[in-house]
């Protein structure tokens, strides 16, 4: 039964859907990264170098 079911499937459609999904997610991540404010980026970059714990102000 599974053999007959897989013979009807067109794998090129799944490959195209996977590529489209990847492209959409990639573009969303790039847009989100470019829209991040510079002060947030600077604060995140200093996390590793900070010896003191961050104070909530």
Image (spheres, rainbow, N blue to C red):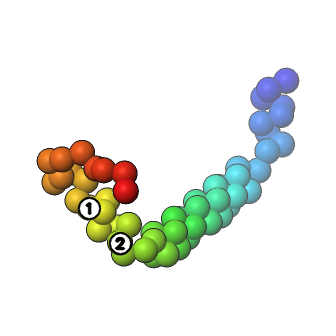
Q: Nearer the viewer, residue 47 or 29?
A: 47
Q: Which quadrant holds residue 42?
A: bottom left
Residue at x 69%, y 58% (from the top left corner): 17
The image shows residue 39 at horizontal and vertical percentages of: 35, 72
Q: Nearer the viewer, residue 53 or 40?
A: 53
Describe residue 10's horizontal placement relative to residue 45 as left or right: right
The image shows residue 53 at horizontal and vertical percentages of: 24, 45
Residue at x 26%, y 61% (from the top left corner): 45
Label 2 secondary element: helix
Binning the other alpha carbons within 10 Å of mark 2 as few (below 14), some (14 to 19) or many (20 upward) gives few
Question: Residue beneath label 1, please?
Answer: 45
Describe residue 4's horizontal placement relative to residue 51 as left or right: right
Residue at x 52%, y 69% (from the top left corner): 32
Query: Which quadrant is home to the N terminus?
Result: top right
Binning the other alpha carbons within 10 Å of mark 1 as few (below 14), some (14 to 19) or many (20 upward) gives few
Mark toward the viewer: 1 or 2: 2
Question: Residue beneath label 2, please?
Answer: 39
Describe residue 3's horizontal placement relative to residue 34 as left or right: right
């Amino acid at each position: 039964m599974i053999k007959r079911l897989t013979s009807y499937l067109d794998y090129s459609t799944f490959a195209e859907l996977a590529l489209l999904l990847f492209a959409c997610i990639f573009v969303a991540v790039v847009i989100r990264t470019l829209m991040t404010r510079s002060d947030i980026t600077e604060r995140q970059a200093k996390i590793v170098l900070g010896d003191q714990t961050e104070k909530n102000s």
